[in-house]
Structures are given as structure tokens and as C-alpha cells.
């Protein structure tokens, strides 16, 4: 083929591109007119039956050389872009998404606001073990201005032979500590049947990583108005995480917070891999407060401080970390909890480096 011939073919290709461009925009104008008619009559813009008819017509009329499946795929992209153009991607816009609500959700827990721009700490033991243990930690936290106390009463352990938590006794101890020190208490609930009891004892119900897709539990807590802290599943994608949050929100509960707590990867140097970029992604994609659990993500005491710095620097609304009076004898997660001295250093460093504001727990 001579150069001249090639140039001519290229020129005809450019002409065709321009024709397609003109036609696609003319098509978009018709779509907008149809959208106008539909919104007057209150009909939904997305109409799968109509889409199917258009795809069938393309199949009937196609003379090649493109395969029908290829053309149908291309046309589906055009249909999708048309809906998006009108902000009407109804199939995709979740209630948790920023598309649905541009303003940040701020969750009020007792007197504390989470997601209001002041970054906070949530701390406490992995498991509630005794009243004395919880009161010791609560007092230490309160002394440093931390008002959000965590502690597990129902522990989802990998081994059935490990400590399973004190159950409702644990919730009672937490509530007593919360009332005594005027703190908010957070604990994980693992069964829909325990949600009602939890309402009386807790200020925040935590749904743990292993239960992120326990849909019956999500629906149950979604039907309450208690603040919910939903953790990302061990192997959940961000989209799966958002859909799990949608289960809660679609039942009416808008008091929802998300918590990145590390995901399973091939890396064994840490217990899980803290997916640090999930924090700004979730902040962009959703309007919910986003937290980072540095204890369960790293599983390493020596990494708690750098991970917390990173999480706060990247925009987490709060950091969660585990604190125990004597981690060496803790009934769960003994390798990664801080003792009280270590916690004091941890919070001092975050405040000295101005990653945490003074006076904000
Ligand atoms: C916890 O926070 O106590 C806990 C068990 O965490 P995760 O669900 O993230 O493993
Ligand atoms: Mn733990």
C-alpha cells in the first residue's frame, strides 16, 4: 500500500469518527429530551425492557464485520453513559455514596461527634476480662481526654478453644465503666438476637470483620438508630464493604461509621495489610466517617504509632487501638495491645506532632 493510499484511508477514518461523534451527541440530545418527558410523568429513566429491545434491533440489523456481541457491548456503554450524563445512574448510586449525599455524615456518640473534622482516638482492651481491668484502662484513657472506650464481650475467635468473651456480663461491665467515667462504650455484637440487649448497654455497636457480610445482623442493626461501627471484612473489596454499609443504611440507620482494619494479603510481616489508600477512597466515595484500626491491621505493637500517624495524615476520622493494663497476660491479642505507659507515649507523640489536636480524644 502506498503512502498516499494510507493517507486517504486515514482521512476517511477521521471523517467516520467525526460522523460517529456527531451522531452520538445527537443521540444524547434525544436521550435528554426523553429524560425531560419522563421526569414530567415521574417515570424512571432506566428502562431495562426498552434497552433489551434496542439491543435486539442491533442484533437483527447487524451485517458485520463486527460481531453482534461486540456491538451490543459498545452500545451498552453508550446507554450507560447516557444515564450517567443525566446523573441518573440509579442502579449504582448507593445511599452511602457521595453521589447521593455530598455532605459528610457526622455521627454523634453521646457528646462526641465523629466525622466533624476533629480526629479522635477509640481505645480499650481487646476483650473485657474483668471490672478491674476495664476500669483501669478507662481511667487511664479518660485522664488523657479519650472518651471512646472499646472492649469485646462476644469475641469471634479463630479457635473454639480460645477465650470467647464474657457475653452480657462483659456488656454490663462496659456500661458501668462508661457511666462511671462518663465515656461512650463500643463493643462487637455477633448475633441478631443480641442486638436488643446491646441497645441498653452500648453507645456504639461494632460489627466485626468476620461479620461484615452477616446480612441478617446488618439488617437488624440497620433497623435501630444506634451508632454502628462497621469493620471491613478480612477479604472484602471496597465495593463489598460499601454494599455491606448499604445494608445498614437502607434499613434506615444513618448513624454509621466505616473502619479499615487491614485485609488478607500474601504478606506475613504483619497480621493483615493496612490498606491505607482505602481511607481516602472511602472518604471520597462515601459520606460516612472513616476509621482506622491500627491494632488488628498491623498485629504489631511496634507499628501502632507509625500506622496511626499514617492513618491520621491520610484523613481518618478516628484511630482505634487496643490498650490493656498487662498485655502479657491478656486473654486475647496479647502481642499487640499497648500497656498504659505505652498508650500515654502513643497519644503524647500524636499530639506533639500535631496529628491529634490537644483536648480532643
Ligand atoms: C475487634 O475489634 O475486637 C476485632 C475482633 O476486630 P476485627 O473484627 O477487625 O478482627
Ligand atoms: Mn483484638
Image: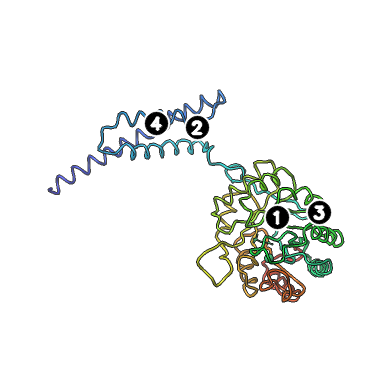
Label placed on residue 206: 1
Q: Nearer the viewer, residue 79 or 69?
A: 69
- Which of discs 4 and 1 lies nearer the camera? The answer is 1
Nearer-N-terminus badge (1/3): 3
Query: Residue 135's image quarter?
Result: bottom right
Within 8 Å: ligand 1 and the Cβ of disc 4? no
Nearer-N-terminus badge (4/2): 4
Residue at 65%, 65% (x, y): give it: 159
- Which of discs 2 and 1 lies nearer the camera? The answer is 1
Residue at 52%, 69% (x, y): give it: 267
Asked which secondary structure carries label 1, the reply is strand
Q: Are marks 2 and 3 in contact (CB under 8 Å)?
A: no
Could you give the CA–CA distance between mark 4 and mark 3, rounded to whole angstroms? 58 Å
Could you give the CA–CA distance between mark 2 and mark 3, rounded to whole angstroms? 45 Å
Label placed on residue 46: 2
Asked which secondary structure carries label 2, the reply is loop
Residue behind mark 3: 201
Neighbours of disc 1 within 10 Å: few (<14), some (14-19), many (20+): many
Asked which secondary structure carries label 4, the reply is helix
Within 8 Å: ligand 1 and the Cβ of disc 1? yes
Where is residue 149 shown, x and y percent of the image? 76, 62
Nearer-N-terminus badge (2/3): 2
Could you give the CA–CA distance between mark 2 and mark 1, rounded to whole angstroms? 36 Å
Neighbours of disc 3 within 10 Å: few (<14), some (14-19), many (20+): many
Residue behind mark 4: 27
Residue at 75%, 76% (x, y): give it: 341
Could you give the CA–CA distance between mark 1 and mark 3, rounded to whole angstroms? 13 Å
Label placed on residue 15: none
Q: Nearer the viewer, residue 154 or 353?
A: 154
Amino acid at each position: 500500500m502506498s503512502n498516499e493510499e494510507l493517507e486517504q484511508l486515514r482521512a476517511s477514518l477521521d471523517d467516520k469518527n467525526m460522523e460517529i461523534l456527531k451522531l452520538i451527541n445527537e443521540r444524547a440530545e434525544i436521550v435528554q429530551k426523553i429524560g425531560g418527558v419522563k421526569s414530567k410523568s415521574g417515570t424512571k429513566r432506566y428502562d431495562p425492557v426498552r434497552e433489551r429491545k434496542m439491543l435486539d434491533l442491533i442484533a437483527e440489523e447487524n451485517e458485520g464485520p463486527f460481531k453482534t456481541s461486540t456491538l451490543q457491548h459498545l452500545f451498552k456503554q453508550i446507554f450507560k453513559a447516557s444515564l450517567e450524563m443525566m446523573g441518573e445512574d440509579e442502579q449504582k448510586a448507593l445511599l452511602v455514596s457521595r453521589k447521593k449525599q455530598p455532605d459528610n455524615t457526622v455521627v454523634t456518640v453521646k457528646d462526641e461527634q465523629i466525622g466533624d473534622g476533629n480526629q479522635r482516638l477509640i481505645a480499650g482492651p481487646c476483650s473485657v476480662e474483668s471490672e478491674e481491668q476495664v476500669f483501669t484502662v478507662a481511667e487511664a484513657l479518660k485522664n488523657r481526654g479519650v472518651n471512646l472506650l472499646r472492649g469485646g464481650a462476644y469475641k469471634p475467635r479463630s479457635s473454639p478453644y480460645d477465650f470467647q468473651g464474657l457475653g452480657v456480663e462483659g456488656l454490663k461491665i462496659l456500661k458501668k465503666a462508661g457511666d462511671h467515667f462518663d465515656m461512650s462504650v463500643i463493643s462487637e455484637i455477633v448475633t441478631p438476637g443480641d442486638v436488643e440487649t446491646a441497645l441498653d448497654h452500648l453507645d456504639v455497636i461494632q460489627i466485626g470483620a468476620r461479620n461484615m457480610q452477616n446480612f441478617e445482623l446488618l439488617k437488624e442493626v440497620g433497623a435501630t438508630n444506634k451508632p454502628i461501627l462497621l469493620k471491613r471484612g478480612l477479604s472484602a473489596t471496597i465495593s463489598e464493604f460499601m454494599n455491606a454499609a448499604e445494608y445498614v443504611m437502607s434499613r434506615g440507620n444513618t448513624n454509621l461509621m466505616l473502619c479499615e482494619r487491614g485485609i488478607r494479603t500474601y504478606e506475613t510481616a504483619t497480621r493483615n495489610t493496612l490498606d491505607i489508600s482505602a481511607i481516602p477512597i472511602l472518604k471520597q466515595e462515601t459520606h460516612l466517617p472513616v476509621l482506622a484500626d491500627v491494632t488488628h491491621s498491623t498485629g504489631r505493637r511496634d507499628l501502632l504509632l507509625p500506622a496511626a500517624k499514617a492513618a491520621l495524615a491520610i484523613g481518618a476520622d478516628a484511630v482505634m487501638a487496643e490498650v490493656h493494663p498487662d498485655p502479657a497476660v491478656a486473654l486475647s491479642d496479647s502481642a499487640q495491645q499497648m500497656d498504659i505507659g505505652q498508650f500515654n507515649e502513643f497519644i503524647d507523640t500524636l499530639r506533639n506532632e500535631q496529628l491529634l489536636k490537644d483536648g480532643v480524644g
